[in-house]
Amino acid sequence: MPELPEVEVVRRGLAPHVIGRTIAEVEVLEPRAARRHAGGPADLVDQLRGVRVAALVRRGKFLWWRLEDAGGEDLGVALMTHLGMSGQLRVRGADAQSDAASSDAVAASSGPRPDPLRHRRITLRLDDGTLVDFIDQRIFGGLWTSPLVTASDGQAAGMGGDDALLPADAAHIGRDLLDPAIDLEAVAARIRARSASVKSLLLNQEIASGIGNIYADEGLWEARVRYDTPGSRVSRARTLALLEATAAVMRRALEVGGTSFDALYVNVDGRSGYFARSLSAYGREGEPCPRCGTAIRRVSFMNRSSHFCPACQRKRS
């Protein structure tokens, strides 16, 4: 599943193509990709046709398009986008591919370009002829509209936004670790107040959003914290170090276009990210720990895999 760095790479790559543009037409090829829209696919088409994209904002793994009418009035709703397990947003058009490939947001990515039309579910045609395709092999993601509400702390709602308005469907998730408005002390306190495993708490989107299995394992390895340690057993200093380490890992991933293991995650120009080459624990079962040389182990945990170094991340009594 694309995590925070991957969704942010998509936001940065997509923004120059869509902000300030009007959605001229919408084509829904797979109704399941619009299943979260209350009025169904036909209503989604009607709501989006002729509206202008004022901003592209992200919090955690949620991406939303701020919408306004032709006169510049905010419509009070946002177009929500969630990539699910395999979703992509791809840009097509006479100049779209070359523009995306040359932008700073995607210049560091590489790899093969998968078929851009396979598994196409929804296409937005903009007034300049640019096409934005929502591609989703497994159809766990989708597009839908959600009314805007005010963030509880009154600060800018997410990356790319300049006010406190965010979609109601994203209001329940916490700020992410790359958000300038996040209160790390408060996040650390919430983790330390729980007896659940620290990894499960990192994955809890209501505490801090955007962290998935890859970056949880990498952050835990960086901070030398074992995945199954109860949150209440981690000191304040170590919890803050864990959050800062996880944020640092995600920043490094963002610099190289995110993490790609297959064609299910690519940037808006169809390129894969480089960060899989830099992972220290995730996906490295049996390989030597980059820090101490002990073989990385993989165990089943919470219906997923956890990768860790048994020497660097010892179980604490």
Image (cartoon, rainbow, N blue to C red):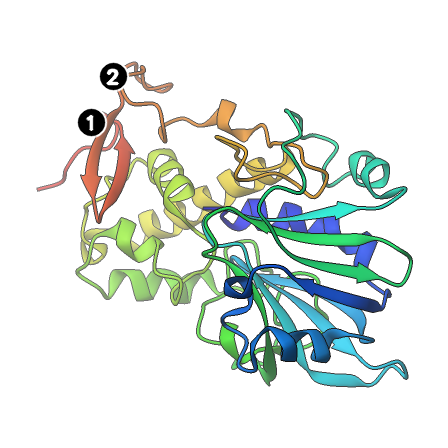
Circle 2: element type: loop
18 in relation to 223, above or below: below
Q: CA–CA distance between discs 1 and 2?
A: 7 Å
Q: Total of numbered circles in the picture?
A: 2
Q: Is residue 54 above or below residue 106?
A: below
* Residue at the image point whose x is 80% and y is 68% from the top: 23
Residue type, label 2: Thr
Q: Residues within 10 Å of mark 1 (few under 14, many from 20)?
A: some
In the rendered image, residue 75, in percent from the top left (x then y), is placed at: 74, 84
Q: Going by the picture, which residue comes out furthest to the left?
A: 317
In what quadrant of the picture does the C terminus appear? top left
Residue 156 visible in the current orientation: no
Q: Is residue 111 shown left or right of residue 188?
A: right
Residue occupying the point 58% across, 84% down: 149
Instruction: State the image coordinates of residue 153 (x, y, percent, origin top left).
Output: 54, 79
Q: Secondary structure at mark 1?
A: loop
Which numbered dot is residue 42?
none
Say which amino acid is labelled 1.
Answer: Pro
- Residue at image position (19%, 38%) is 300
Locate residue 165: give its quadrant: bottom right
| Disc 1: which residue | 310
Query: In the rendered view, does 150 fall on the left or right side of 209?
Result: right
User: In this orientation, does residue 303 appear?
Assistant: yes
Of labels 1 and 2, earlier in sequence is 2
Which residue shows up at 61% across the image and 38% down it?
266
- The one nearer the camera, 283 or 263, is 263
- Considering depth in this image, is 139 or 150 the residue closer to the camera? 139
Discs 1, 2 touching: Cβ within 8 Å = yes
Q: Residues within 10 Å of mark 2 (few under 14, many from 20)?
A: some
Label 2: which residue? Answer: 294
- Rendered location of residue 65, percent (x, y): 69, 68
Q: From the viewer's perspective, is residue 237 above or below residue 145?
A: above
